[in-house]
Image: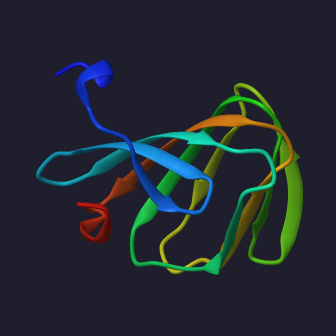
């Protein structure tokens, strides 16, 4: 498959994702609008977030940091987290197991 052929879905306001699923994991290629917010939440999936472009404020278990290009964050299952795009961003999220609600 080619990312250019995958339709983008707006999963939450300002978060446009191209989603790919295998048997055991999901990967989301996000284009995020400046100011878009991911409310605090948690899920059973282990997650790895990679910031490709932009500046992204991210809170994990109450600790807030600003991440930029090439930063990677490991988010354990059931950990509370939230985020906000301080600039337009490109992010990649990998989830295991599959993020069923993104299908």
* Left or right for 31, reference 81: left
Depth order, front residue of 80/90: 90
Q: Identify which residue is drawn at 39% across, 69% down.
A: 45
Residue 52 located left or right of residue 30: right
Residue 18 drawn at (x, y percent): 37, 40
Q: Quadrant of residue 3?
A: top left
Seen as rendered, the residue at the extreme left is 23
Question: The N terminus lies in which quarter of the figure?
Answer: top left
Residue 80 position, x and y percent, is 65, 79
Whether 29 is drawn above or below 9: the answer is above
The residue that appears at 24% across and 68% down in the rendered structure is 100
Q: Say how the picture is coloured.
A: rainbow
Q: Residue at x 46, y 78 (%)?
A: 43
Q: Is residue 40 above or below residue 66?
A: below
The image quarter containing residue 55 is top right
Q: How many marks?
A: 0
| Viewer-nearest residue: 46 or 5 | 5
Percent position of residue 79, x then y: 60, 77
Q: Identify the image quadrant of the C terminus.
A: bottom left
Q: Position of residue 36 (x, y in %)?
A: 72, 57
């Amino acid at each position: 498959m080619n990312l250019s052929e995958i339709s983008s879905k707006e999963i939450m306001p300002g978060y446009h994702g191209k989603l790919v699923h295998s048997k055991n994991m999901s990967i989301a290629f996000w284009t995020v609008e400046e100011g878009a917010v991911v409310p605090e939440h948690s899920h059973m999936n282990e997650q790895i977030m990679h910031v490709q472009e932009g500046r992204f404020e991210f809170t994990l278990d109450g600790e807030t940091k600003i991440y930029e290009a090439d930063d990677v964050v490991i988010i354990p299952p059931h950990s509370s987290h939230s985020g906000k795009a301080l600039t337009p961003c490109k992010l990649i999220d990998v989830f295991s197991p599959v993020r069923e609600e993104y299908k």
